[in-house]
Image (cartoon, grey):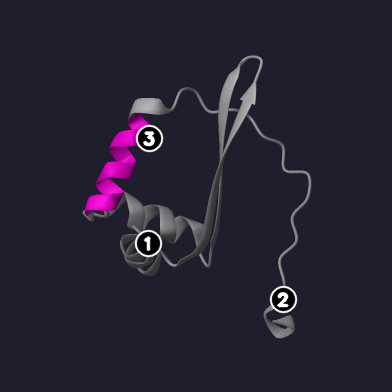
Amino acid sequence: RNAEVQVTFAQEGVRHEQAYLLKTAEGSVLIYAMEAADHELARAAFQRSSLPIDLEHKRMMNQVLGEAANAELLFECVAAEDDC
């Protein structure tokens, strides 16, 4: 469904997404990473999207997600525009 994903990426300003399922003794943890120019804009665009793939994504996530896990950001580095 790559073509559908590319449309939603264009709407949201997203460049890259990855999802991992980390299995632990206490259960599974979904780790979802996204690269976007503006994360708030991307979130808002996803929330108002009526694209079939986004509607399916929302339904699926509502079915499988439990409580949010607390995560501590240990490191973040962003390339400067002039360096790209």
Judged by depth in the image, the label closer to the viewer, 1 or 2, is: 1
What percent of the width, then of the height, locates residue 17?
52, 55
Quadrant where the C terminus sits is: bottom right
Could you tell me how far apart the alpha carbons at marks 1 and 3 are, in whole angstroms?
19 Å
Residues at marks 1 and 3 touching, judged by CB atoms closer than 8 Å: no
Neighbour class for label 2 at 10 Å: few (<14), some, many (≥20)? few
**Residue 7's spot in the image, x, y percent?**
32, 66
Label 1: which residue? Answer: 2
Magenta highlight range:
52-62
Determine whether, in the image, residue 9 is placed left or right of residue 15: left
Type of residue at label 3? Answer: Met
Q: Residue at x 71, y 85 (%)?
A: 82
Q: Nearer the viewer, residue 58 or 45?
A: 58
Q: Residues within 10 Å of mark 3 (few under 14, many from 20)?
A: few
Q: Nearer the viewer, mark 2 or mark 3?
A: 3
Residue receiving disc 2: 80
Task: Reply yes or no: does residue 61 show up in magenta.
Answer: yes
SS of the residue under disc 1? helix
Q: Earlier in the sequence, mark 1 or mark 2?
A: 1
Within 10 Å of disc 1 (Cα), the crowding (few <14, some 14-19, many 20+) is few
Query: Considering only order in the chain, which callout, 3 or 1, is on the residue closer to the N terminus?
Result: 1
Residue 80 lies in the magenta-colored region: no
Position of residue 41 in the picture relative to residue 26 (left or right) = left
Query: Disc 1 vs disc 3: which is toward the camera?
Result: 1
Which residue has dot 3 on it? Answer: 61
Q: Main secondary structure of the magenta part?
A: helix
